[in-house]
Image: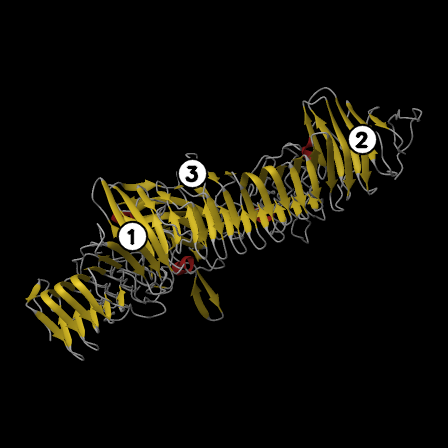
Amino acid sequence: MTVTNQERVREFRGTSMQVFGGGTFTAVNLHVHVMNFTIDALATVHATLKGENFVYNGKGPGANSPSPGFAGGSGGGHGGLGGRAVSQVTTGASYGSIKEPNDFGSSGGKGSGGGMGGRGGGILFFNISNTLDIEGTLSASGDNYVGSQAGGGSGGSILIRTVLFEGSGTVQANGGSGYRDQHRGGGGGSGGRIALYHQGGFFDGVLEAAGGNGDVENGAAGTVYVEKAGNNSDRPHRTLKVDNKGRPPLTERINQVEEIKLYPGSMHISHSTVYTSISGLQFSSNGATLSYRHGSDTYYYSLSRMCDGDLKNAYIVQSSYTNAVITVSLPRNMFIHHIRLYPFCHQNYRVSFTLTTNHPTIGFKDRTKGSRSFAGCYDTSVYNDVSIEDTISEFTVTLTRLESYVALSEIKVFVGRETSSFYAANLEQDSSRTWLVFDDSGVTTFEVDELDVRGNAHLAIQNKAGSVEFKVNEYKGDFTGTVHVGGAQNLYLNASNNSVIPFTLRTYQGSKVFLPSEVYLQKSSIYAESELTGLANLIISQSSRFDVTQDAHVNSPTKATILLDRITILNGGTFYQRTAEPAKLTVQLTGEITINAGAAMDVSQVHLQAHNIFIDIAGVLTARGRGYASMKGEEPGRQSGIASGAGHGGAGGRSSSQALVGKAYGSFEMPLHFGSGGGQGYQDLPGSSGGGAIKLSASHIVQVDGLLDVSAKGAVNQGTGGGSGGSILIQSTLFLGKGKLLADGGEVARASFGDAGGGAGGRIAAHYETTRFAGAFSAHGGASRSEAGGPGTVFLSENATHKTMIIDNNGYRASKLYISDYRDLSNDGGRAWLLAGYMDEFTINLLQLRGGSHFAVYHLKPSFTLHVERLEGDLGGMIHVSKKNRVYINHAPRLFRQAFTCTMRDLFICLVTFYSRTCFIPGFHWKERSVEWIT
């Protein structure tokens, strides 16, 4: 049976209705008011726009295939956003009420050949005064694609009010599927919205509003809202379920920055000056394309080459052109994040460029602020990003030749925006997420007793005019879903006694999440960019992640600050500090932190305060490579065709073409500095990044049985310098363990034309009252066949009375024996430095000098005295003592044939055999004399 009144309501009233097994009742907008309604097994009641002869595309139709262009149509939106088609950017919008759904679904977008998308689902309103019994199917699902490359329609609306709800059937408002094709497939339609109000009965069937399958992206899930009135309760039990049946979106983050697909495309002829990408961006040039011959055939460096993703190809204009103007028209007004240009860095093809955009209302705008040049660039995938972050209709790139030809290797266009404001205009280029739409002014409060997010569904809240309070008393899920919390939104999860949050949380700037006192992340994660509160005990388990940016703060008004009782990171769990540049994070605990075997804490710089700090065997606390990038930091390596290494605890290593190095810096007693980046080298490629910084302050125990690592990364590009190691500072009552503490410099890549200089080691310091640490320290310089980086320093202080310094360069030696000029240390590499500053004197109870280490002292006062109670080594080290320096060594159990260099009566040795060229040695039981240096 089919009834229709176009999109208008068709209403049935009576005592009872029944659809028998095998029967089908089809409508468009059906309202039923009866006492009893029964849908037998194998019977169907279906509301759909499919087959209707009137046009109604809905409030969130999918985007049609762009014209020009030949991408597919995206899915229709409703309960969520539709899925994008191949190479599409936009999709169908989300709309409609969660509690009182009364909207049609929307049509999927048309395919490139005009193929029709699936129609949206219809509307069903059942007002049943006694019993609704569903054994068959009650559906307002969207239709699958109709024509080639088209998108699926979105689900419609089902609103049920009944006293008793019975049966084992299916209630659905699913999205339709998009066309499947490798290059021009359609997006899936989103699920619709279902709301059910009942007082009792037993229903063990299915309530679903899943998104439809898409070729590259599925439609989002819709919403299923259920209120069940209780006999003895002041209010009903409210449940919101979002389930997308295992169909995730393409991106994890709302409005995530991503590249538009520009290839394949179409050209009329191979040397045409117009190219249309699959996504509908049309490129036109005023330059004539350069041709070349291969055998008897003629080929062209065509316009399409700058969109094909191959950096070995290029669009090249004939030599008679000094410049070429490339205009790119967008298929619609689009928000562009940035545009990336790759030059063709070969001799005769380098260019400079300008880039302007055309704004729909403002007009043209210069985005490069003048010309940007690729002069002297090398073929190393170098590029230049031009920030747009605006809605534009077209952009123009003007290329000016610097040599013989105008050429461009590649152009890439990126969409997405960094915003936490979730309202419709900001979400036009997002997709496949479920949205709760609250656009009222003032404060909107939405509360559910149970939130169930599963099946890779992504749930978010859309609010334009006001703020939203979303209160959740209990939560369920299968650990695959995600809940997003945007600006001016508060999410309350703290009413629950359940510590396991079975979905991932993503919080954006300006939001606030109230958490239970204990959170156990198990196959789910928290990505925090804003405020979290209420949490006291954090447990991070297998395949879980606690990810914080510099805008995140927990139980504190100060950003990048976390105040908790305790943190436990179990096997497979990760605590991660997310930052684009080196930055500090403060973590203060009243209890302890434990990093178990197989667990990791990955930071840039952290100050971790706790009662106890435990790093188990195979546990990792790392800031490896999280310091300054190449050519950045306090003492980066110096740029050259073969660069030098960065300095920190020591000086960086020199190269054959760069004698200047990164100098030593930072405190050996209280190291807190980042490592610096290695020098930019061969073909302007970057060196490695330096290490980060970790400070551990425990009122009782620090126990390291695993790995504590602030080393620099190794350089991967030949001829580029190594970064320097970072800093480790430990303060505790008891220092225990058998693990490793590393602050090594970055090694360099071997090169046939000569190695760059290695990065210097960093600095490690530990202050404690008692120690039973039997592990290893390492702060050696990065390896290089030109010159390794200088060793860093390891300083150990027990009760502030017994001080040990360990300097070990792992067998790597400085290339020069002597320091030529103390006034300028930038041309002296490969040595560790004790920077005494304005101290008058300092005492080291035990100095260990090993592994080819060179150790020197630099002071700012007129004179400085270093007292060494005991000197140990492996006969391979060297101490350098400057003018106005005095070094007292009271005891050394071994001979040091290559032990010291000195100048002008400034070294004092007791009971040690010493060989010198010119200096005088007044020592205990020794008569002052001058001897020659013996090697």
Mark sitting earlier along the chain (1/2): 1
Mark sitting earlier along the chain (3/2): 3
Q: CA distance from mark 3 to mark 1?
A: 25 Å
Left or right of 813? Residue 513 is left
**Residue in the picture at 22% in, 60% down:** 194
The three-letter code of the residue at mark 2 reads: Glu
Dot 3 corresponds to which residue? 555
Q: In the structure shown, which secondary structural element does the residue marked by tag 3 occupy?
A: loop
Residue 793 appears in the figure: no
- Label at residue 449: 1
Given residues 575 and 685, the one toward you in this image is 575
- Label at residue 869: 2
**Residue in the picture at 39% in, 45% down:** 515
Q: In the structure shown, which secondary structural element does the residue marked by tag 2 occupy?
A: strand
The three-letter code of the residue at mark 3 reads: Asn
Q: CA distance from mark 3 to mark 2?
A: 48 Å
Left or right of 211? Residue 343 is right
Query: Where 281 falls versus 812 (above or below)?
Result: below
The three-letter code of the residue at mark 1 reads: Asp
Given residues 533 and 826, the one toward you in this image is 533
Q: Position of residue 4 (x, y in %)?
A: 9, 69
Pointer 3: residues within 10 angstroms few (<14), some, or many (20+)?
A: some
